[in-house]
Amino acid sequence: MRLLRSSNCEEAMLTKRAILLAVAGLSVGMTGTCPVSAQSYPHRLIKMVVPGNAGGPADLLARLAAHGLQSRLGQSVMIENIAGAGGILAARAVARAAPDGHTLLLGNTSVFSVIPATSRDPGYDPAKDFAPIAKLADAYQVLVVEPSFPAASLPELINYAEHNPGKLDVAAVYGTIPHLAAEMFKSAAGIDITHVPYKGEPESITAILGKQSHLCFINVSTALPLIKEGRLRALAITSATRQPELPQVPTMIEGGVAGYVVTTFVGVAARVGTPADIVGRLNGTINQVLASAEMQANFARLGVRVSIGTPQEFAAFIAAETRKWTAVATDAGIRID
């Protein structure tokens, strides 16, 4: 059995350990190598570049997907974690790679849509530099407050904000999904809430827990344990429908914010120019991996939903999300030079 390699190692939390144990338990079958051709791809090790450090949600999803690819393609898949600049460094690395399908990007909403929507020149253009292969999963954000906050529901929060304009603030890293989600909320609900920038999501959460800020949008995988421990109160989720992890928490739409849906996603892409049949083979193989009941269960543990589709559907989705976040960023005056 060939073992997956990583450029970084970090100690994971209990849930993450469970996922990694599940990954380790997946069987890895190997087949013989073939001469170099699109039909016999891959003919050498595949590198999957992940924006961020080892042990994070994206890294765990990458490892699950990589093991599935490894067992079906008959080649080792190495995870390379490239942290920094919100994913820009990882994206640039893949944008400079050879277009042969042996270097893949495990990108997210930020890399594929938000950074291009908010940055003047991130050093890459998803529409020109990448060949979308497959969307792996969708997730959502959770609007949370500290349990002693005077509003116990989304309608109460909106009512409080209406009667106290400018007195509430939302914690978020500037130019990120939580920030854009907050600006979208302000616009859709017609309320005046002040954005307070923080260095990272942990700092934003700490500010809420310490009652230094009033509310924030955070990823469901991060929110779940804090909500279950009673340290945060969930007022609403940003998906279109209620979710099994938080069945008692209404959607933003149910809470009175018409049309409000914010989803995040993770997907795989290669360098533009990668042969279409290689893209097609990778897409078909990834979809086989995602169709596994075991894989779907592992993804669910991380608070995400498997998403199966074609490269064309993924490309159209990225384009639509980029247009959406460009409009939000433009209306809110969010721009990163």
Image (tube, rainbow, N blue to C red):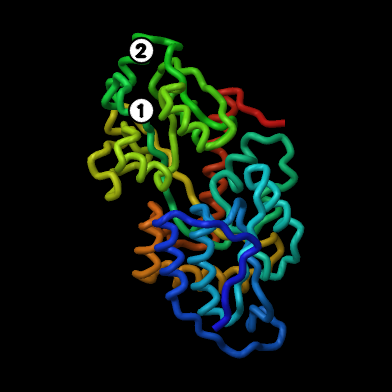
**How crowded is the residue under tag 1: few (<14 C-alpha within 10 Å), some, or many (20+)?**
many
Residue nearer the viewer, 6 or 118? 6
Q: Which of the two discs, 1 and 2, sits closer to the camera?
A: 1
**Numbered tag placed on residue 282 in the rendering:** none
Image location (x, y in percent) of residue 279: 60, 68
Quadrant of the image containing the N terminus: bottom right
Q: Position of residue 81 (x, y in %)?
A: 63, 57
Q: Residue pushed farthest left?
A: 248
| Image side of residue 41 versus residue 154, left or right | right
Is residue 5 depicted above or below 174 in this figure? below
Residue 162's disc is 2
Disc nearer the start of the sequence (1/2)? 1
- Tell me the crowding category of disc 2: few under 14, some 14 to 19, or many 20 or more residues within 10 angstroms, Cα based: some
Which residue is more in the foreground, 47 or 307? 47
Q: Residue at x 52, y 57 (%)?
A: 11
Front residue (pair 207, 159): 207
Location of mark 1 (residue): 146
In percent of width and height, residue 189 lies at 38, 22
Q: Are marks 1 and 2 in contact (CB under 8 Å)?
A: no
Q: Amino acid at mark 1?
A: Glu
